[in-house]
Amino acid sequence: MLRAAGSAPCLCTRWIPARTPTPTFCPRKRPATSTRSIHNVKPECLDAYNSLTEEVLPKLHSDADYPCDLVGNWNTWYGEQDQAVHLWRFSGGYPALMDCMNKLKQNKEYLDFRKERSRMLLSRRNQLLLEFSFWNEPLPRKGPNIYELRTYKLKPGTMIEWGNNWARAIKYRQENQEAVGGFFSQIGELYVVHHLWAYKDLQSREETRNAAWRKRGWDENVYYTVPLIRTMESRIMIPLKISPLQ
């Protein structure tokens, strides 16, 4: 039986039969679109970048004329350093995304913000994401928490199989309310999945993850999904002051 690194040794093994995947999962709950942006910041500019971000982005979040909502804003703690991660949600789907983009082109304060921000960056990239229907909706939560963004790059053609397995397995990761949201890429690098988790601290993360291995059925999810993965990455993130996910 597969188990997580650092978990208690298992004294028994269990044969897991082959399963034929069927296209049963629905990719999203509602016509919501999310964008994930990653900014690699010049090390000497990170504090100034955070201050500028915390000044401008909440105005867009609170302005009813812009059909977008901040989901979360973080600095990477473990992973690539001097990095900011931003997650936005457009509940109206693609029309809301286009409406927001067109309005921002006419927003002088935002254009000035982008110009000033560009001087602080080494690089930036983004993805257009959809939500998995069976995952928790990423709602604001109180802190303090640390967040783990686990990114899986899948083999092309395996997204349905991944979704079917996780639709059954997500129930094993709910006891400590650690499941925040699950997303998959629609534009940008394709066949990329992001799972967002919240923990009180690193010790809580270890205990919660180890507890999943004591639940019958979790090992099956790992057994069936690991072969679908090309590469995977974990980053631990600390919320910015403005992040609805604290």
Image (cartoon, helix red, strand yellow):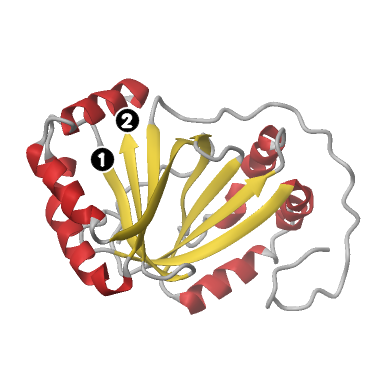
Q: Which disc, if any, is residue 137?
A: none
Is 192 on the left or on the right of 224, as rendered? left
**Cα–Cα span, label 2 and label 1:** 8 Å
Would residue 21 be visible to someone looking at this image? yes
Is 186 on the left or on the right of 211, as rendered? left
Q: Which residue is mark 1?
A: 69
**Image x and y of residue 99, in percent:** 24, 24
**Image x and y of residue 123, in percent:** 38, 55
Q: Which residue is mark 2?
A: 91
What residue appears at the point 78 percent right and 33 percent down from the top-left corner? 21
Is 115 on the left or on the right of 92, as rendered? left
Give the residue at the far top of this rendering.
Answer: 95
Is 226 on the left or on the right of 102, as rendered? right
Q: Element at badge 2?
A: loop
Comparing 180 with 111, the one in front is 111
Give the residue type at disc 2. Answer: Ser
Q: Element at badge 1?
A: strand
What residue appears at the point 52 percent right and 38 percent down from the top-left corner? 185
Q: Residues within 10 Å of mark 1 (few under 14, many from 20)?
A: many
Give the residue type at disc 1. Answer: Asp
**In which quadrant is the N terminus drawn?**
bottom right
Give the answer, above or below, for where 4 lies relative to 90: below
What residue appears at the point 32 percent right and 53 percent down from the top-left corner? 72
- Examine the image and state in which quarter residue 213 appears: bottom right
Precedes in sequence: disc 2 or disc 1: 1
**Image x and y of residue 7, in percent:** 69, 75
Give the answer, above or below, for where 203 lies relative to 65: below
**In which quadrant is the C terminus drawn?**
bottom left
Report the label total: 2
The answer to whether mark 2 and mark 1 are in CB contact below 8 A is: yes
